[in-house]
Amino acid sequence: MERKGTLTLFDIDGTLVRGARCHYQAFVQAVDKYYQIREDISGINYAGKTDPQILREVLELGGIGENAIQKDFQACLKYMVGYYLEHVHRENIMVLTGVEELLVQLQKEDVLLGLTTGNLKPIAYAKLGRVGLDNYFSFGGFGSDSEDRPGLVKKALERARDLHHYQGDRIFVIGDTPRDVAAAKPFQLYTVAVATGSYSSQELSGCGADYVLEDLKDVDQVLEIINP
Ligand SMILES: [Mg+2]
C-alpha cells in the first residue's frame, strides 16, 4: 500500500546524540593498523562528512597515495566496524535533550522515520543502540552506501520508496552541519539545521537551511515545523 504523509531523515552525531569517542578511536586504530599512520587526526573537521570520506582525508593528509589507499580501503573500514562493535559498550553517548520525546511523538503521528548519516551502517545502529534509539529507525542512508553525503541521502529516499512504499513529497532532513543541508538540496527536501553539534546557529543561518534551531528541546515547536 502506498504511503504518503511526512518523512523525516535524521543525522546522528550532533543531531540525535553527542559524544562518540570510540568512533574516533576506531579511525585512529584502523589507520594505524593498515597504513601505519599515527599522526594526530583530531585537527580534521569531520562534522557532516561520511566515514569513508574522513578515512580518505586522513590517509591523504598522511601522504598515502591513491593506489595504496585503494588497496586496503575496504579492509580498513571493516576493521573500524569491528573495533567499534567491540568497544561500543565503553562509549559514552548522550541523547540530546528533546530527541527521544520528539521521536516518540513523530512515531505516534505516523511520520516515517529514517536516518541520513555518514556513519557506516553497523556503527550507526550500534551507537543508537547504546542509548536505546535504534528501534525508531527501520532504514536510512549511511556512510556504507556512499562516500559523498548526497549519495547517501539518495539511498535513504530510495529505501523509503522500496521498503515503505513512500510516495509523499513532504520530506525533512534534520542535521547539525551545512553539509547536511547541502546534501539535501539536490533532492529539493526541506531542511532543518540544529545547533547542537559543532556549528552555532549563527554559522548555520547562512547555509541555506529552511529552518535553523538552537536545539530540539521544544518538541512542540519542532512538530509545528515538521508535521503541523
Ligand atoms: Mg552530524
Image (cartoon, grey):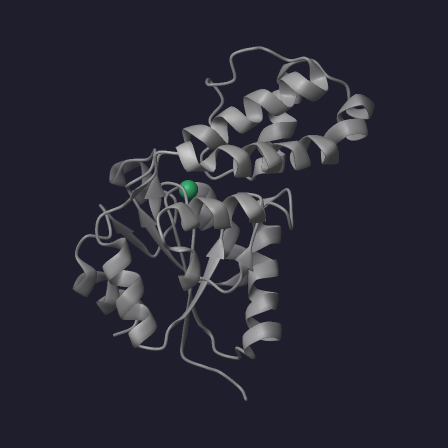
Residue 100 % position (x, y): 27, 57
Residue 27 in view of the camera: yes
Name the residue rendered at 34%, 57% in the picture.
210
Q: Quadrant of residue 66?
A: top right
The N terminus lies in quadrant = bottom right
Q: Please tell me whether residue 186 is drawn above or below residue 57 in the rendered image.
A: below
Name the residue rendered at 27%, 54% in the picture.
99
Q: Please tell me whether residue 154 is drawn above or below residue 38 in the rendered image.
A: below
Residue 32 % position (x, y): 64, 16
The C terminus lies in quadrant = bottom left
Classify residue 6 as left or right of residue 39: left
Name the foreground residue: 139 vs 208: 139
Residue 122 % position (x, y): 56, 47
Residue 16 % position (x, y): 34, 49
Residue 117 in view of the camera: no
Q: Quadrant of ligand 1?
A: top left
Name the residue rendered at 52%, 77% in the picture.
166
Name the foreground residue: 122 vs 56: 122
Classify residue 167 as left or right of residue 171: right
Name the residue rendered at 53%, 79% in the picture.
167
Q: Please tell me whether residue 172 is drawn above or below residue 29 in the rendered image.
A: below
Classify residue 195 as left or right of residue 153: left
For the image, the number of numbered tags is: 0
Q: Residue furthest bottom?
A: 1
